[in-house]
Amino acid sequence: MEVTTLTTFLAPFLPYLLNPGKGTSETATNKFGEASWQKAQTVWAVLKPKVDAKESAKEAAMDVAKNPDDEDSQTVLRVQLKKLVASDEALSNQLAGIFQVDSSSSMPTTQITQNVKGNQNQTIGQISGGQVFGNVTGSVIISGSGNSVASAYGSASSSEPASPKAPDADVKTILVLAANPKNTSQLRLGEEVREIQAGLERSQYRDRVRIEQRWAVRPRDVQRAFLDTHPLIVHFSGHGEGVASPSNEPGDARKAVVVSEGTGDAYNSRTQSEGLLLEDEVGKAQLVSTRSLANLFSLFSDEVECVVLNACYSATQAEAIAQHIPYVVGMKKAIGDRAAIKFSLGFYDGLLANRPVDFAYKLGCNAIDLESIPEHLTPVLKKKRKEAN
């Protein structure tokens, strides 16, 4: 993981990440854009437990939050983050996965030209995809549509406003929704999405499929993602909550384990409720019920053909959603983080090889079994019942 990139990206968001409160999320979204703010929340959710555990790193982050543009403060934070990343390979891989997924997204080309005095106009370059961070002195001309410039004093947009556009009918969209609320146990969601992206890149059908990612999703983010991307396949990665016996659960289960902000202790929050855990306005867990999920998918039943709920106890939601969607994968009990990642790897390798959903599901289960993980029977495939004539 490139620590300089990480520090430069994170610095302007720290005042909002370290001081969450009512209206903070909305303010940050308006200033930086929804995608960038969601990405910052995802990165911080991964980093925060490590930073809080090291006093010098915590102080460095607080100093940057007070003055995000101060280069000396950023340098101190960069040194602290470098130590954390160098000593924790899993942390480094998870952060790299988040940035790799983001950089792989397809974005329109934007040309930036800097105006200087005299007759010497200097072209800085063309950018396709990704984001640009840094300081610019002078005037900036932006051509194209849907582009924006964010600064410490606000944001400006190009004169041509962006509007949602349906993808090419020949290109199928996989929508990945990820949520790991900051008061729940941390999952390796970045690694999972990286495996899905790698499967697409090696597929001979990669030109026919695109992957859209939405991180740290709130309930309204899900609706907007459906409207904007027109997905054929919807994949949820995160925590689930349901009623089941806790015996023989894997230690890395994707169940609703809440982490106390005061002590850092973890405890099982399972109640009689069932559903998926998304995030609220301050990044904490918000349960979305089975009924609400089923109703949502019923509205998009003419577009969505397959749903994967890669979270614990999601078989109940899969059953309800399958009343409207042809194929839905859920988990009939708690599933470990490692098993969940292996299932995704096998499932999408099969699907992106142009195999049917039934085959891809079996390949995903087999991918778990091949790693000698005793959870290959946890995923279940639910199918929409054919209506009688």
Image (cartoon, rainbow, N blue to C red):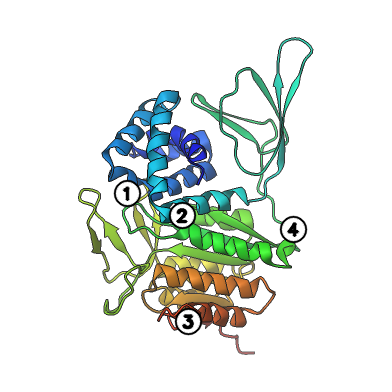
Q: Earlier in the sequence, mark 2 or mark 3?
A: 2
Q: Are marks 4 and 1 in contact (CB under 8 Å)?
A: no
Q: Residues within 10 Å of mark 3 (few under 14, many from 20)?
A: some
| Element type where label 3 sits in the image | helix
Q: Residue at x 69, y 50 (%)?
A: 165
Q: Are marks 2 and 4 in contact (CB under 8 Å)?
A: no
| Element type where label 4 sits in the image | loop
Q: Does residue 281 show up?
A: no
Relative image position of residue 380 (x, y in whole percent)? 48, 81
| Alpha-carbon span between mark 2 and mark 1 | 14 Å
Q: Earlier in the sequence, mark 4 or mark 1?
A: 1
Q: Residues within 10 Å of mark 4 (few under 14, many from 20)?
A: few
Residue holding disc 2:
94
Q: Earlier in the sequence, mark 2 or mark 4?
A: 2
Q: Are marks 1 and 3 in contact (CB under 8 Å)?
A: no
Quarter location, residue 169: bottom right
Q: Earlier in the sequence, mark 4 or mark 3?
A: 4
Residue holding disc 1:
49
In the picture provided, is 127 more to the left or to the right than 180? right
Along the line of sight, the residue nearer the viewer: 301 or 270: 270
Q: Amino acid at mark 4?
A: Asp
